[in-house]
Image (tube, helix red, strand yellow):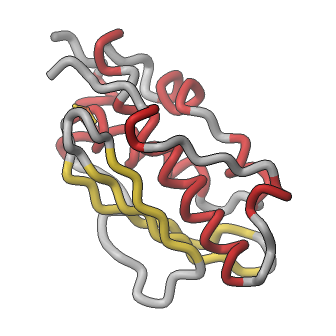
């Protein structure tokens, strides 16, 4: 399987790995079919994502997309992070092999789950912000 240079860089030396102890939003998403799990931590001040960290028990593509996705949302307003699609993350990585596109959905969904948690903690219904989290089994499995 051919991976782009950027995917290899983010896989071998992923950015933003870890945990934020006093995170303002935490989201966990799993892929029921391959069993991979991603946990996302966001620190948010005045509606700006000042820090993002993740832990992934997953494949190379899941790690590379989480690394790139957290890079992309850091310093961005929450409204922009909500618009981040897995497609944009894949493009930023110069592409993923077609059978690995599904892995990138984990990062997008984990960010949305963390933002849903951020709103819930403030008593705001995430649905009112247009956040819809897919069920685990709605996320297609990668062919591993
Ligand atoms: Fe499970 Fe890629 S996320 S194989």
Q: How far across and down, in percent of the image, does residue 86 sit?
A: 53, 31
Q: Position of residue 131 (x, y in %)?
A: 71, 51
The quarter in which the N terminus is drawn is top left
In the image, is residue 78 above or below residue 92? below
Left or right of residue 131: residue 50: left
- Number of disc labels: 0
Q: Quadrant of the C terminus?
A: top left
Identify whether 60 is placed above or below 1. below
Measured along the vertical axis of the image, is residue 61 above or below residue 45?
A: above
x, y (%) of residue 65?
A: 39, 38
Q: Nearer the viewer, residue 6 or 100?
A: 100
- Quick check: 62 left or right of 137? left
Instruction: Report ligand 1 position as a quadrant.
Output: top left
The quarter holding residue 60 reads top left
Q: Residue at coordinates 72% horizontally, 80% vertically from top-left? A: 45
Q: Residue at x 42, y 80 (%)?
A: 20
């Amino acid at each position: 399987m051919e991976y782009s240079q950027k995917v290899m860089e983010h896989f071998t030396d992923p950015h933003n790995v870890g945990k934020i102890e006093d995170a303002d939003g935490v989201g966990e998403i799993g892929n029921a079919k391959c069993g991979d799990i991603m946990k996302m931590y966001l620190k948010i001040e005045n509606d700006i994502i000042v820090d993002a960290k993740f832990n992934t028990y997953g494949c190379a593509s899941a790690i590379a997309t989480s690394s790139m996705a957290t890079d992309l949302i850091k310093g961005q307003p929450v409204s922009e992070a909500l618009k981040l699609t897995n497609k944009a993350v894949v493009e930023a990585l110069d592409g993923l092999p077609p059978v690995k596109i599904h892995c990138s959905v984990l990062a997008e969904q984990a960010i949305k789950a963390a933002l849903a948690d951020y709103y819930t903690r403030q008593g705001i219904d995430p649905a009112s912000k247009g956040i819809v989290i897919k069920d685990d089994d709605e996320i297609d499995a990668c062919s591993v």
